[in-house]
Amino acid sequence: MDDLSRLVFTVYRGARELSFTHFQDFALEQLKTFVYYDRAQWGDSAHDIESVRNCTTGRLPSPLQAPRVELECAAHGKPEKAVLIPDSHGANSGWQRTVLTEAKSKTGLRSAHCYRYAHELMTCFANPNTTSAKSLSLFRVRKNQIFLENECRLVKNFLPHLIEALNINQAVHIEKIRNRQQEAIWSMAVADHAGNLIVSEDEFDRLLEEEWQCPRHMAVPAELYHAITGKPDQPFKGREIIVFNYEINHAFFLKGRRRLPIDRLTTREHEIAKLIAQGLTYKEIARALNIAPATTRNHMQSILEHANVHNHAALAVQLQLVN
C-alpha cells in the first residue's frame, strides 16, 4: 500500500469515528506523518473563474504548534520561485490548482520567537457552482527544506479525499445533532462561514424554497444568514419555518422544520405548557409560578387553542416534537 492509500484509509476511518471538533486536527496530523510542515491552514476561500483569493486564510483552523510567526510567504509578498503543478479540470467537479512558492530571504527577521516561512505548498479545489474553494496550505520555516515533487503530488491527490472525508464527518455529526426520536420533522444542512451550503438535505431545500419562494439555494438566504450570525443562540423564526443553528469549528450546522401550531405560544404560555406536559395540575402550576389559579386556567385554555389540541396528552406530544 503506497503512502496516499494509507493516508486516505486512515483519514476516512477517522471521519466516521471522530467528532467534528477533533477530526480536522486529526486529518492534518495524519498528513504530517507523510509530508512534514511547520504550520498548516485548511479552510474555505473565495475564487473567481481564473484564480483563488485568500487561499491561505482558512476558516477551519488547526491547532498550530509552530513558533510565533511573521508571515512573509508568496501569498503576502513577491515570490522568488513559483511552480505551478498541472491543473485538474472537470465539467462538474470544478478545477484544482497546486502552487509551490519560495519566499525571498531577508536578514534580521529570525529570532528565538519570531520566524518567517521560507516555503509554502498551496493546493485548492474550486466549486464550479459557487464562489467557494477548499484550500490547504502547508508552510516550512527552513530554507533548505523545500517541498519535493512527490510531496506536492501527494498533497494535490489527497485534497479531494480530505474534502470528501470532511463531508462524511459532517454527515455523521448531523445525525448526532438531529433529534433521533422525532427526526422525521427535522431536516439538516451545513454551511461554511461565508454562507455557502456545503450539505443540504432535500427537505431542507424545500423549506428554503417555501419560505423564500425561489428555486434551489446554493447559499443560505441573506435573511437567515444574518439571523444565525447576528443572534447565533436564538432560532430563526420565519413565516413557514424554524431553523436552529449549531456553530462548530466555524461551520454552521442548521436544523430546520416547518412551523407547528404550538409555535404560536408566548414565552409564558410555553413555560406553562411544559409544566402541563409534566403532569402538574393547574393549582400546582399556580403555586410553582406564583400566579393566581384563575390566571393559570385562562392560560391553559389559551394554550390548547393556540396549539390546536383538545387535551393535555396531545399537547405533550407537540411539545416533544419541537424540543
Image (cartoon, rainbow, N blue to C red):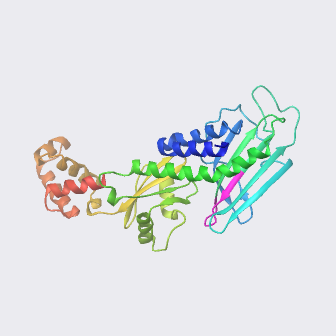
| Residue 126 is covered by the magenta coloring | yes
Where does the image place residue 128, in percent across and percent down from the top left? 64, 66
* Residue at x 66%, y 37% (from the top left corner): 32
Say how many tags the image has. Answer: 0
Residue shown at 71% from the left, 32% from the top:
68
To which quarter of the image does residue 9 belong?
A: top right
Percent coordinates x, y for residue 271 in the rendering: 25, 49
In this view, the residue farthest toward the top is 112
Q: Residue 81 in the image: x percent, y percent?
A: 86, 48
From the viewer's perspective, is residue 20 above or below residue 255? above
Residue 82 coordinates in the image, percent (x, y): 84, 50
Side (left or right) of 15 relative to 293: right
Q: Is residue 231 visible?
A: no
Range of residues picked out in magenta: 123-132
In depth, the one of 79 and 140 nearer the eye is 140
Q: Tell me which corner region of the image, top left, top right, bottom left or bottom right, holds residue 25.
A: top right
Q: Is residue 9 above or below residue 195?
A: above
The residue lying toward the viewer, choosing from 121 and 56, is 121
Is residue 71 a member of the stretch shown in magenta?
Answer: no
Is 313 left or right of 80, judged from the image as shown? left
Q: Is residue 240 left or right of residue 55?
A: left
